[in-house]
Amino acid sequence: MQLAADSGSARGLPRQVRDPLAARWYVAETLPAREEIAIQNLRRQQFISFYPRFRKLRRHARRQGTVLSPLFPGYVFIRFDPDRQPWHSINGTFGIRRLVSATNARPQPIPEAVIQHILARCQDDIARLLDSPEPG
């Protein structure tokens, strides 16, 4: 799995995150079809981000091919420590509409079990989908 950080993809936390346990995952809503622009701009600001996609079969005019489609269209995941990093700058990042939060004061972190489940199903930010979906 590759997570976007300061120089391309990095597996560690940026320098400003000293306590890895304090850094949590958050969700940011992006502008329509601007997820990749948002990821690039977050990388420039030294934020770790995650944009999971999946391989989708696309058919058009008797041609078919595989394209990468967003697993969660309109959303990206960002890991940071709100007490130590300038997270307010995320809302002003090109491609980002806003951080998802219950209140306007602070963003709401994602439960660690949820993000770990998503990360476990991804390799190089590409999700492995179930071969046969379960009913319901």
Image (tube, helix red, strand yellow):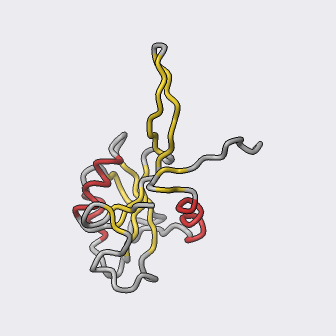
When the figure is inspected, residue 52 is found, relative to residue 42, above or below; the finding is: above
Relative to 73, is 135 on the left or the right? right
Q: Residue at x 31, y 67 (%)?
A: 47
Vertical arrangement, residue 33 with respect to residue 81, above or below: above
Q: How many marks?
A: 0
Residue at the bottom extreme, as displayed: 19
Residue 78: percent from left, percent from top: 39, 64
Q: Nearer the viewer, residue 100 or 60?
A: 60
Looking at the image, the residue that sits furthest to the right is 135
Q: Quadrant of residue 80?
A: bottom left
With 31 as the anchor, is 72 left or right in this view? right
Q: Where does residue 58 sit, x and y in percent of width and height? A: 49, 27
Please give the name of the residue rendered at 34% of the width and 61% of the height, measured from the top-left corner. 4
**Image side of residue 125 versus residue 43, left or right:** right
Q: Quadrant of residue 61?
A: top left
| 11 vs 72, nearest the viewer | 11
Q: Quadrant of residue 86?
A: bottom left
Instruction: Tell me residue 91's x, y (percent).
Output: 30, 59
Residue at image position (57%, 57%) is 121
Q: Give the quadrant of the C terminus.
A: top right
